[in-house]
Image: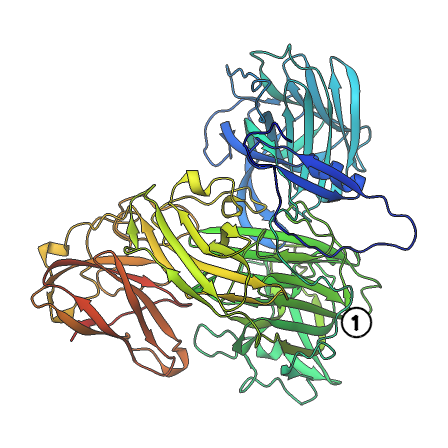
Amino acid sequence: LKSGDGSDFPHFSNHIVQVELEEGDNVVAVKFESGTGKTPGISIGGAEDLRNLSSRIKIVEKFDSDDYEQDTPRPGNPQRVKRIFTEGMDNLVTVAIYAPGTRLEFPEKTYDLPGKTSNKYFASGLRLYQFDGAGSLDFCLGQELVLSVWRQTDQGDLKMTVKQRGVTLKSSVLPLASLPADLIFAVSASEYLVNAGSIHDSRLFAFSGKADCTNLKSFAATVAVNGVSVTVDEYFNGLASREVKSHSIPMKIDLAATFDPEQAGWPLIFQDEFDGTEVDWKNKWTSQPWSRETNANNDLAVLKDGKLHVTCEWNADDNGKVKGRAKNLYSRERFSYGYFEAKVRFTRKPGCWAAFWLYDEGRNMQLGGGYEIDIFEDYSTRGGKPVVASNLHATRGSHQDSYGYHMNLPGSLDDFYVIGCKWTPFEISTYINGQLVEANSRHSPWQSLTYDAINHGFGTSTLYLCIGVCVGQSGGRGVIGTKEEFIVDWVRVYEYPRQTAPVVTWSKLPQKSLVAEGEIFSLGAVSSKPGTAYLFDNGRLVDYKTSPPYDFQLAIDWKHYKDTPWHQAGRSGAQMNLDRYPHIYRIVVQDSSGQVGYTDVFPMISDLQPGQPWQDRMPAIPGKIDPTAFNTGGHNVSCFKQSWTPHPIGKELFSRKKLGLREAGEFVTYTLDVKQSGTYRLTMPRRPYPEDLRWPSKALVIIDGKYVGDLKAEAFEQTAVLDDVKITEGIRSMVLISACAYGVWPDALEFQ
């Protein structure tokens, strides 16, 4: 330690976590991770837990990859088909079916292991969806090392075995029920690591060992399919490094083994005991809050015997194909942090699943919507298994990270269960019958069904409470002429008390919100109570400070963002890009009691190009602006339009007839001809909409690169207003950013 990298002794900030110990002897292991010399760490836990932690892998670079989306010739001539990504996520992906005797490879490509002093590994991997028959799937690195995924019969679980020149080094089991799973075989000059990360239930099956691979040079990396048929996706060769999901970033969450919101003093703010004669569609529930009121399928949600009964039925359509009908109930009000619980009996027939979740439209956890908390989805009960799923989908613009768990029920599917979700600023945990659900996953350091702000995302948007039945392919297809019933005894919501939360305000802000890539800027905050401060960008952590002053210096580039929690991927493996999508910053402070406060948002955009005035017209100020006369330049240049699939850079995507910035974070740019310096009022009347469709409207305004404030209107107000806008005479630019669920739909813009 005395002869380390620097002149100072290594030190660690105060870091306190709560652990559970059993009566009697407890074995505690300590592991020192030297890392690169700049990021040492200490992990403390059970010996087996630390062994699993040390075997986790993350991909840092892909040399060659194939997602099978392109219809091009490839070795093995696989059959390309569409299927759902996984149960609970019905989006379609393209996968490849390889027949026995074929192999996967990137022709004429050879590879070398990283140098002995590197902390990287060569890695080969793929996403395995199906394994049919008896035989093996062999990851071959030259003639030296093989990872074989195999079984001797056409049924049962799989085994993973590493062999070196035919000699078995180590084996482990991969449950067939964990598929689809991401398989990664990583090798250095002295050791190997194997990861099988389940997409289905998020469990990680990992092992590692020593192997002298110094003779492995200029090798081919292939995957041989022997005696079986396999369905795969996302095949690649590249570089990997170790990943430790641990408590290395200090934070406090209260993982209480049992929880009762009434005993904790959380006030009851919403309940429905379903004791009436019909669903209260007028005061408590709606078919969906973001479109016109409809009574479609209301006949499938009825009250009887003091309970809500939601039915799903399958009939034949005009072409004789199965068509399902079901119903979901959405609360009429949005909720913030609290405890959400319901007493339910789950479903079990394929073709639908029951769910209890929190959600809102919008794609930004700080501006509007942006995340979906699936307290439970029961598509995994098909076949009578007493297992239900939980999922979290966190969205940042066009990018979404998804995480999930499976939880075992303590009884049968004939029983009723009280299932609850404790949602606080830094914690989302699930309870069954008042007991914290035990679970583990590759995306979380916790041994409970818990999502947290550091590893999964920090959200501030309010959400609707939703309960009902969804129709889809998760869990299988429905059968014509059959029905399924979901029963809910009651639903209750308790508010999380935040009266003692620290008050956090900005103390330092950049002069400009428009910066060049790599340009250094500073953000700072002060808090009414000391604690740990965290800098979040669109709900993902970039940096933190354990004590004041809470000042951060950074730039929007990979030097400052790579290898931070901001850059961690969800179960799809896709990582966030640095593009023109706005960076919405908050500084968040957690005090010694665990209470959390945070600043207002502050927007930044990197490398924005203003484009050219539409038809060379520059609206005069004071005066009106036609919202559709935004600058040319196109997507990801002078404006940003969101989509789950990438838009071509420079393509014009917003309508010139009526402008709608539908999703939070979308923006357009204008060039203004300011005739007179002064302080102005900026108004934005909405496009005409029925009163029952109005929502709170908010747009962030940047003028000449400086964030000047928010155009805001309550749901009942027709016109959004921003006062005290200072502009100087000359040619100026303005950026208008949607900052609410359902978006901004201007009928006009006017400076007065």
- Is residue 173 found left or right of 454 in the rendered image? right
Quadrant in which residue 139 is drawn: top right
Q: Position of residue 47 (x, y in %)?
A: 80, 39
**Is residue 225 visible to the viewer in this orientation of the structure?**
no
Q: Position of residue 742 (x, y in %)?
A: 40, 68
Q: Nearer the viewer, residue 608 or 654?
A: 608
Residue at image position (71%, 28%) is 228
The residue carrying pointer 1 sits among few (fewer than 14), some (14 to 19) or many (20 or more) residues within 10 Å by Cα, namely some
Residue 49: image x %, image y %? 76, 42
Q: Quadrant of residue 241?
A: top right
Give left or right: position of 5 versus 476.
left
Give the residue drawn at x 71%, y 45%: 203
Residue displayed at 28% across by 56% down: 511
Under mark 1, the amino acid is Phe
Going by the picture, which residue comes out furthest to the top? 215
In the displayed structure, would residue 223 be above or below residue 691? above
For disc 1, the marked residue is 416
Quadrant (top left/top right/bottom left/bottom right) for the C terminus = bottom left
> Going by the picture, which residue comes out furthest to the right?
24
Query: Please, is residue 536 above or below residue 742 in the view?
Result: above
Q: Nearer the viewer, residue 577 or 633?
A: 577
Q: Residue at x 40, y 78 (%)?
A: 693
Position of the N terminus by quadrant: top right
As drawn, 469 above or below 555: below
- Choose between 666 and 380: the one closer to the eye: 666
Label 1 secondary element: loop
Up/down of 110 relative to 633, above or below: above
Give the total of numbered labels. 1
| Residue 482 picture location, percent across and down | 70, 65
